[in-house]
Amino acid sequence: MNLIVSAIGQGLLWAILGLGLFLTFRILDFPDMTVEGTFPLGAAVAVTAIVHGMSPLMATFLAFLAGMVAGLITGLLYTKGKIPILLAGILTMTAAYSINLRIMGKSNTSLLGQKTLLKTKFLSSLPTYFDSVFLGMLIIAIITIILIFFLQTDLGQAFIATGDNEKMAKSLGIHTDNMKNMGLMVSNGMVGICGALIAQSNGYADINMGIGTIVIALASIIIGEVVFGELTLNQRLVAVTLGSIIYRLILLAVLQLGFSANDLNVLSSIVLALCMMLPQFKKALHLDHILSKGVRVDD
């Protein structure tokens, strides 16, 4: 039971990463590799700030600002420098590696004996692993409500229009470059928060903790869409969180079969690949079902 509660708590915390990538991957319709650098950047900033005496809440806010700066750099490389978005994200991600080393001064920093958001008096009084569940639910609820409200504003609609049809958005007087920069900033700011929270949950920040994070974020998005089907935009935001929890439970189930924790990255890739191919499996099964009944199917 404790393992399931722990998986749910981790799923809620990691869902922030999925929501962040959702803004760029699904709404703006481009992949942002910056997240693999922004995630450890948020962790490095938050942990270093906490170690130097800053409150965990302010340290987490600093991680958000650091993530926004990284997103802005990628945005400027993409919109002003005319560098392809994939390459722009990789450049920022690569630079973030050295910056993280500068911030921490070493490859990893421990929070042993330090106060974190999960060690507040109230959360410490909760049963084992329920601290991350409560904190995750609280933060996810706040972020989801803010995003739902934002996407219904004129600015939010302009942001959505930029992703749907950039040429049409420009014809309506929308500054699409500004929308892209804003989306990258908010997205990576959220990823920075996720990095800060995961570091506080794990008790340390490591220079390599960003490896594979984009796969985790994509898994949350894809699983949520595959499991829950056709949804409104607001419902899809909730589905990302549920997808993140389901993904963590799937990994838990796989690990219980005897796989090593060292296999997590390859297992994550396999789970994501299967989820992305599921619509094709459904289509093939449906086609076989039709053919078995002797119904003619035109190409």
Image: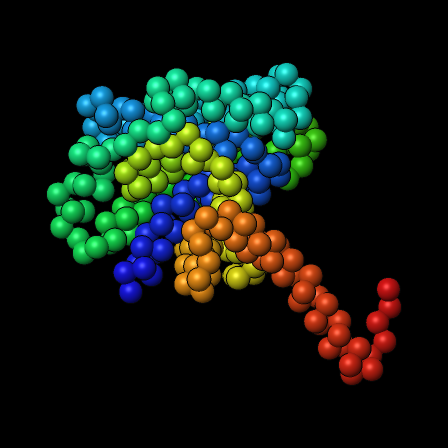
Residue at the image point whose x is 82% and y is 79% from the top: 295
Residue at the image point whose x is 48% and y is 29% from the top: 37
Front in this rendered view, residue 287 or 4: 4
Is residue 148 depicted above or below 100 in this figure? below
Percent position of residue 104, x then y: 34, 22
* Image quarter of the C terminus: bottom right
Q: Is residue 62 left or right of residue 81?
A: left
Number of numbered discs overlaid on the protein picture: 0
Say how the picture is coloured.
rainbow
Percent position of residue 240, x then y: 47, 51
Percent position of residue 62, x then y: 33, 25
* Image quarter of the N terminus: bottom left
Front in this rendered view, residue 289 or 50: 50
Is residue 280 depicted above or below 10 in this figure? below
User: Looking at the rendering, which quadrant does residue 61 occupy?
Assistant: top left
Front in this rendered view, residue 189 or 128: 128
Residue 179 visible at all: no
Percent position of residue 224, x then y: 51, 55
Front in this rendered view, residue 190 or 7: 7
User: Looking at the rendering, which quadrant does residue 169 occupy?
Assistant: top right
Q: Is residue 179 left or right of residue 20?
A: right
Residue at the image point whose x is 57% and y is 23% from the top: 91
Q: Residue furthest bottom?
A: 293
User: Looking at the rendering, which quadrant does residue 99 occupy?
Assistant: top left
Residue at the image point whose x is 49% and y is 51% from the top: 263
Residue 271 visible at all: yes
